[in-house]
Image (spheres, rainbow, N blue to C red):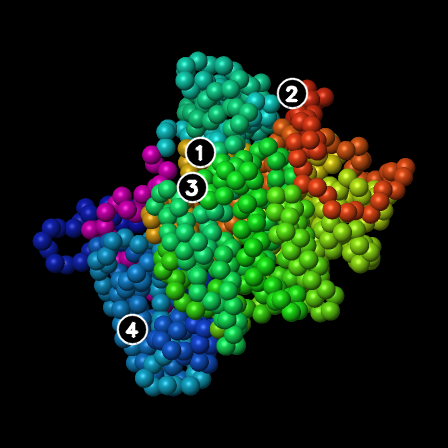
Amino acid sequence: MKYRKIAAALMAAVISAGSLAVPGVGSVQVLAADNIITNGTFDKNTRDWGFWQDSDASADISCVNQKLQLRVDKTGGENWSVQLYFDGVPMYKNGVYHVSFEIASDVNRSADFCIQENGGTYQAYTYKSLKLTNQPQKVDYNFTMTADTDTAARFQFNLGKCSENPGVHNVTLDNVKLELIDSSRVNPSEIIHNQDEDKPQGCDNILVNQIGYRPDADKVAVFRNVSGQSEFKVVNAETNQTVYEGTLKDRRQNSDADETDWYGDFSKVTKAGKYYITCDSLGTSYTFTIGNDVYSDVNKDLVRMMYLQRCGTDIKAGDSFNHSACHTGRAQLYHTSETIDVSGGWHDAGDYGRYVVPVCKTIADLLTAYDNSPESFGDDSNIPESGNGVPDILDEVKWGMTWMQKMQDKNSGGVHHKVSCKDFPGYVMPTEENGQLIVTPISTTATADFAGAMAMGYEYLKSDYPAFAKECLANAEKAWSYLESNPSFIFSNPSDISTGDYGDTSDEEERYWAAAQLYRETGKDTYKNYLESHRSAGGMDWRQCGTYGQLAILTDSRIDKSSSIYKKAYNAFISDADEALGNSQMHGYGEALSTYEWGSNMTCANNAAVMGMAYKLTGDEDYYLAAEKNVDYLFGRNANNVCFVTGYGSASPQHPHHRPSMCQKQAMKGMLVGGPDFRLEDGTAKTNLVGEPAAKCWIDNSESYSTNEVTTYWNSPMVFLLSTLSKTTAQPTATPKPTATATPKPTATSTPKPTATPKPTATTKPTSTPKPTDTPVNHRRIRYSQLNLDGEATLFGVVNR
């Protein structure tokens, strides 16, 4: 949703060429052009270049004597089994391009060069067959782009299988150029097209939560591009009557977004309805809603996304995302002839792999959300189990756990890391991925996560599915037995599998979660002893999930708060919450981030959920207000002015990296996309976002998998976060926040070791308690005023770009 950095130059070239071109004259208007290949001489490194190897091929890339060198060890079974490429090349229909490069091989071999569509049908826009020798040859020619415009094409060399069977050899590349030399017949609107151009005037200057606010929420809009204005108005969108007038305050430099921001507090507007904000020449904001149930629909769709990601069953969504059962064949155990049934589960993300580690995070988030606010989850979300008397969120968890049981080795108790085909599929519906499924070896990270999630599932499913829940607990304990007998088996992809890795460097956090959850459910000394002798490990993403273990301890009403287990968990958890709070207060939009990296929206939701739980534990309103600000950020009050959940808000992602959405040419509703990633880790991001500030490194393009992909474990923390702000969150405890010298005050008497806790019911759930109201409404403890323009140099963190 941004103008490309080259747009202005290209547009100038179009105008210039257009003014000089004479219809019917065959001569080409040659324009001064920049090299689109940003690193074509390899003076220092191979930056911006990548290589890909199929499962039966092997290669490596390096910079030697200021040239790119690709060592090919095995060529594989196809000419494209080894690829050397530069991604993110803008190719405009009717544009005339100049290509040149020097290439050699230390053995004679054939190869292919092309510029092609990076996905879809992989059509080639230009193609050359090459005969390589040890003498560098220069390829130099012009061509016209005849296909439709593609702003994220791939500049590629195919260096796989060839007739010469060359064995191990080196290919060198140097002096690569790609230039647009004549743009006179390029449609200017394609070059400068901005997906935001249909916005109402001024929407980009006044930023709000596009879904809306609960009546008693802290409501603060962000204003940018302010030039002298100081007053703003809140207008009822149905009557066009002004209901509130306020003053802009707290000007601050937002270095992450490269902008100056002002803030307008309209928390006094509490009446249910639809509103927008105006501010003189800045125009109007998007319309938003105020209401008690303002998040009920998005919450339901965030959970229902899990059903739409189900594997191995017919999906009856009532729309274009219907499909018959997929991936139903038996899967082969890696490097054996044995096959097993691992049907079911959820497609992980934009691809169709199924991975134990992130599934366990998803389950933990959903169950914690249910525990926080069971009345927020009904039995009516239009899934096959709807109407069976069990909340659909629990039925969805059971679906995921049923698949997980199939991934456990029945003899050892260890859990296989993942199941997928050996490569990612093309852009096809799930029923069209028909390759052999492969189950990879056991890992201790998957086994420990499995133990934690299965034990947690036992607690919440035993009332409705007692036999299944009992199996879950038994399988969790069997997994723990495997962990006791085996060292750290950390998974990494075998050389012949290229799907999601979900590797790690340690299984410490996973084991901590498993021990804590099993101690909560069983009270056994085995788990207690482990917790007493190990640190309280934190983290809430798929790689570091110790926070779920801390919550298992801290939310157990029977735990002895004087125990070392509780104290360690409490201090570690509050330390993480304080770090998140500091980051949230530092950033101009309140986002709880230390940097903007792949999956930053998940990190934002994770950290905000931690603050929401810290509020429940301490009653400190700072945590609650900061968590609210992160909901606002994810729902539209951000530097990109977009609600990051598909199908919600006035501006939401239309082109997620999600194969069913790409196939159906529409975004599936209710998916949280990844968000800004300043590292620009795909070709589309590199093309469109170079030079953008970190907070704006997001683009609504299906090829931008590093900023616009979706996953089940990005949706689940959003559900978790919303549950912490529910009007029925638990009464904050009296436990004080720890200081450098103090630990939580022990209780007077010890409580028994934990046993299984019943699932919350209408009679056991704590009564509804509103957000604390002892602080006046206009006393904002999110400390914007402390981070004003003058103090920015010393108080703001700097993102490493």
Q: Give how far across and how far down residue 565 sits, in percent.
A: 81, 49
Q: CA distance from mark 4 to mark 1?
A: 50 Å
Give the mark, 3 or 1, whose residue is nearer the N terminus.
1
Q: Give how far across and how far down residue 99 sits, in percent.
A: 29, 66
Which circle marks residue 669 in the picture? 3
Residue at the spot 48% in from the left edge and 64% down from the top edge: 420
Q: Nearer the viewer, mark 3 or mark 1?
A: 3
Q: Which residue is mark 4?
A: 139
Q: Amino acid at mark 1?
A: Gly
Q: Nearer the viewer, residue 752 or 725?
A: 752
Examine the structure image and report whether residue 196 is included in the region drawn in magenta: yes
Q: CA distance from mark 4 to mark 2?
A: 70 Å
Give the quadrant of the N terminus: top left
Q: Amino acid at mark 2?
A: Val
Q: Give how far across and how far down residue 123 sits, in percent.
A: 28, 62
Side of 257 relative to 573 (left or right): left
Q: CA distance from mark 2 to mark 3?
A: 35 Å
* Above or below, comparing residue 354 to residue 383 in the picture: below
Give the mark, 2 or 3, whose residue is nearer the N terminus.
3
Q: Nearer the viewer, mark 1 or mark 2?
A: 1
Q: Within the image, what quadrant is residue 731 found in?
A: top right
Q: Nearer the viewer, mark 4 or mark 2?
A: 2
